Amino acid sequence: MKEDPLVYTVKELCRTCYTCVRGCPAKAIRICQGQAEIIEERCISCANCTLMCSRQAKKIKDSSAAVIEMLKGRRKAAICLAPSFPVEFCDTDPLRLAGMLRKAGFSFVNEVSFGADIVSLQYRKLINENPGKKYISSACPAVVSYIEKYHPSLVGNIAPIVSPMVATARIMKSIYGGETEIVFAGPCVSKKREAEKYAKDISCVITFAELRSILEAMDVSDRNSVDSFFDPPYPAKGVLYPMGRGLLSASEFEEDLLSGRFMSAEGLDEFTEALKNFEKGDIKADFLDLLCCDGCIMGPGIKSGKSRYAREEILRAYARSKYFNMKIGEWEDYVTRFRDMDYSAFFKTETAEKDAPAESEIKKVLEKMGKINQQDELNCGACGYPSCREHAAAIIKGLAESEMCLPYAIDRLKMTAQELRESYNQLTSAKQALLQSEKLASMGQLAAGIAHELNNPLGVVLLYSKLAAEETEPENPLRRDLNTITEQAERCKKIVAGLLNFARKNKPVFKKTDLGLLFENYFKVFKPSKNINIEFSREGEVFAEIDQDQITQVISNLITNAFEAMPNGGLIKVEVFSQGKFAFFTVSDNGCGIKEENLKKIFEPFFTTKQIGKGTGLGLAVTYGIIKAHGGAIMVESNADRSKGETGTKFTVKLPLEREKIKENAELIKNAGASKEKI
Ligand code: ADP
Ligand code: MG
């Protein structure tokens, strides 16, 4: 049967701080998608996580409504208060508290400390009758649960004696009758689970906080109640149980350093460490008294702003007043009456721990978190686990996530920030490139329209100027003028042809061509002036599917530009190579370079820095159109500033090797090259 969780997380309040993971002695808190979740099978119900969580995201199952119902019922109800009650109710006189509880409807009000006295006697008997056997106290249910789940081999060492709560309940039932409902109020949440095992003895367990809310709900306060005595039997030293070493003192087990027969450990770290060492055989004591909290006075069911030491003082003061005012004879009578009842307990193993993961698995997880060497294991504890290896083991067991590692998370964040920055830059340049190509495309349309319209009238001008020149005598001065008209009209025709080229409507004819060979053929006809050197290098044959005429035109445009950029001579370097699915060629020169502000404009039609009559400003525009039609890209790097080093320009042309891939490649180019491309 699945048990109701005693402690649970309110997800909306949880803020991934891992404080609860760090504090949980049973590592029963799983972080799943950044949210803490209590794993019922692993939880020992110590509820320390409720104390640690500053956001109050951990809640304890509340039974106050059930108790209020019980008080309204026909059966008699009795309440027994855990020995730590003077700490919780330090501002209320114990007699007044007893009066308040009676007013609330409890027919009997008892102290669990007397049950502790009885249990102490049982411990003495057990130790005396079993010399050489080693025992662990069973008073703290969280410790018992921890042993059952995480040290099953020690279950046989748990003293087979019920806790003071159960002993008291049995005594109360024997006095008030078996029908009486027994309610236990204390500082402990784990007692709620323990009581399920002893349902015959105990009807309900509430925390002191719940008891306060019951009194409030029933409008019971110290002002509207009268004093009343607790019901006997009254306790002796059992009052000391909720402090560290309290059980030893109440049982008169001297914690003698010389013999080391009796030992105590309290607190989350201490008790788990003590058990580990007890199991290893490092602890030789005959009796080990363990408390999960720093004494029950620090339990999660107590609401107090006082320090541990202040709480101990309050308890000690109460214990003294009880001890020195007790009626020994009466106490002995009660002890004689109840000492021989059945206080035996049994415990079960309940292995909650899976086998430890293999070393190779741990290594793999550590590596995933960037912990390759031992120095990378920072063991900073930010994840809530004491070491990186324990964190890795928890990841393997499905209890933790790698994101819990702070250094790892910071690294990942840094990487993500860097990636974001890069993709932002890429997007910016892609956006610019897009704007530029849109601009060029609309210019192309306009240019094509104008060129088309101009072509016919120009043809007519040419025809008639030629005819008129032929009909004019050679010595007639008109003939010279007519020739000038023809020349200029021809120049116009060239420009118009260039414009049509830029806005190229006619489809390229693709053919597998060795790009290097194309250059070599070009250089056969290109005759540079003497002071220009050409350095050509090619990486074997680079076959690409291209339109030979168009790419030759590109080559010609680039080489001419390089040549024109070096009026005083220089070096033109050409390289042809391939990389992946692309062919590349570069044309570089050490000429004047392109000014930064012009770099964006050079692909626009009619942009030229050359004198009138020399440049048309169409070479690169046409080049751009051709490369685009090939599904390629053209990049430019240039320096025109002498102070920054040697001036010069380098054009890089990238062309897909195969036609079918063009579409796919166009995408690739857009994504990969966008940051570098200047178009
Ligand atoms: P044009 O050569 O007719 O001026 P282009 O379109 O070929 O037209 O070139 C446009 C402009 O780009 C040139 O006027 C020049 O300013 C610049 N340019 C192109 N290539 C180079 C180069 N290799 N070195 C310096 N400037 C260049
Ligand atoms: Mg040019």
Image: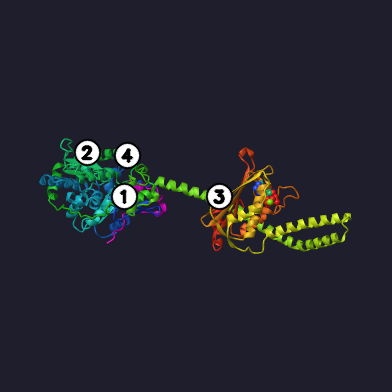
Q: Residues within 10 Å of mark 3 (few under 14, many from 20)?
A: some
| Tag 4 residue | 307
Q: Earlier in the sequence, mark 2 or mark 1?
A: 1
Question: Tag 4, which secondary structure?
Answer: loop
> Percent from the top left, x then y, of residue 277?
22, 44
Instruction: Give the magenta range.
Output: 1-25
- Amino acid type, residue under disc 1 in the picture: Ala
Question: Tag 1, which secondary structure?
Answer: loop
588 vs 92, nearest the viewer:
588
Instruction: Name the quarter where the N terminus is drawn.
Output: bottom left
> Percent from the top left, x then y, of residue 207?
30, 50
Question: Tag 3, which secondary structure?
Answer: helix
Spatial CA distance of label 4 from label 2 is 20 Å
Q: Earlier in the sequence, mark 3 or mark 4?
A: 4
**Residue drawn where x is 52% and y is 48% of the image:** 421
Spatial CA distance of label 3 from label 1 is 51 Å
| Tag 2 residue | 320
- Amino acid type, residue under disc 2 in the picture: Arg
Q: Earlier in the sequence, mark 4 or mark 2?
A: 4
Q: Are marks 4 and 1 in contact (CB under 8 Å)?
A: no
39 vs 658, nearest the viewer:
658
The answer to whether residue 504 is left or right of residue 670 is right
